[in-house]
Amino acid sequence: MSNRLLNSLLILMVVISGVFSPLKSVQAQDEPRPHIKIRGIYGGAPTQLLEQNKQLPELGVNAIFMGSGSLTDERIAQLKKQGAQVFAEFNTMHVANYLKDHPDAAPIGVDGKVCPAPQGWQGICPTHPGYRKYRMDEFRRVLKEYEIDGIWLDYHHSHASWERAVPDMPDTCFCKRCLNQFQKDTNTSLPDVPASELSQILLGKRKAAWVAWRCDVFTDWVREFRSILNETRPQALLGTFHCPWSDTDFNGALKNKLAIDLKSQAKYLDVFSTMPYHARFNHPQDPAWISRQTTWLGQYLDIKGEPGERLKIWPIVQLSDWGESVPVEQVHSVLDHGTRLPATGVMVFRWGSLHPQTDKVDAMIEYYRAIKP
Ligand SMILES: [Zn+2]
């Protein structure tokens, strides 16, 4: 064999191995994951793909999550015709417009004054009866009107901006209504001093009772949402998009600051959609953080991801750029960690800003198709 021929053969071998080995490794890794029942997109129908005459099954997608304000009968029918389930996202404590006509629903801070919205994330006082009725009526209307497969609570927590690397979570709500309700519900009495002094007592020696009461208030909203769902569309699922922290992250902020008691809410919910936006929340190089948080939640709520379990975990994972960007090379890893047990479903955040990044959309489709049973 001449040197020239040998060289050519060597080059050919290098080229062949370069072409085929990545394909081989991807195929070996991406086996179907039959425990994953939901391969979803959050943020509306992928109309940009549907307009190219692509069908959801060929994209590996079988669920669409959209804002309850964007639901139409026509859109739901179109998606269901393609075999997809349709889930609505429902804003609970974050309808800031309500404050224009009802300034008394604004959360009150430790100084006894209206607490400014942290980074614009306006919450509402959780004991304002008018606001609660307004949201419950709207929740009932959405469930009655639309043939949806489920409805997901969103921003169901106290006045805070936690969707960032460094959260901003002011202590609220020390309005007269909340202070009275606390005394009534816990059968205690507070001294007759200004709210600015009461807040110090409630965050000091009475903190345990105060935190527990606040969690109970937010859980009671979930109880009422559940009862409305049971009356209007009992076959639909009730889910929640919630903070992905563990009970000890940020000094127990899940309960202490955000008033989210996952164990108590579990009585009324079907699906927990944690929001482990790894890039946004200070883990840009660590997609494994996603599966670590899912593992923690599974242990905390005793969810294993087995068939027939009442409670489910379907994380919403970050593919679109928000704060930090998510490189296309990470799409595979993010979806891999998002679809590990005890998760039994996954959805990607979020179509509106993701769809122009077609390389990432292609990588998502490739992964969804590969894990589809
Ligand atoms: Zn209040």
Image: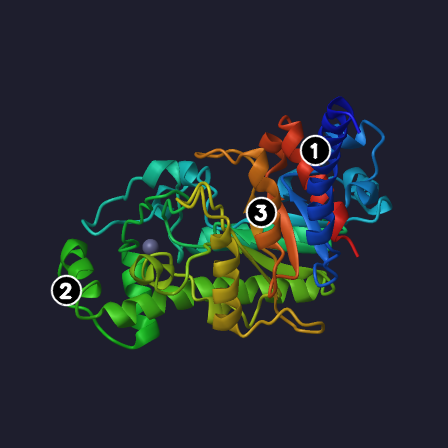
* Residue at the top extreme of this rendering: 4
> Does the image show residue 355?
no
Which quarter of the picture shows residue 75? top right
Q: Which element carries disc 2, helix, strand or loop? A: loop
Figure colour scheme: rainbow
Residue ID for mark 1: 14
How packed mark 3 is, by other alpha carbons closer than 10 Å (few <14, some 14-19, many 20 or more), is some
Residue ID for mark 3: 333
Q: Which element carries disc 1, helix, strand or loop? A: helix
Front in this rendered view, residue 156 or 25: 25
**Could you tell me how far apart the alpha carbons at marks 1 and 2 are, in whole angstroms?**
82 Å
**Are the residues tagged 1 and 2 within 8 Å (C-beta)?**
no
**Could you tell me how far apart the alpha carbons at marks 3 and 2 are, in whole angstroms?**
56 Å
> Does the image show residue 35?
yes
Q: Which element carries disc 3, helix, strand or loop? A: helix
Residue type, mark 3 in image: Ser
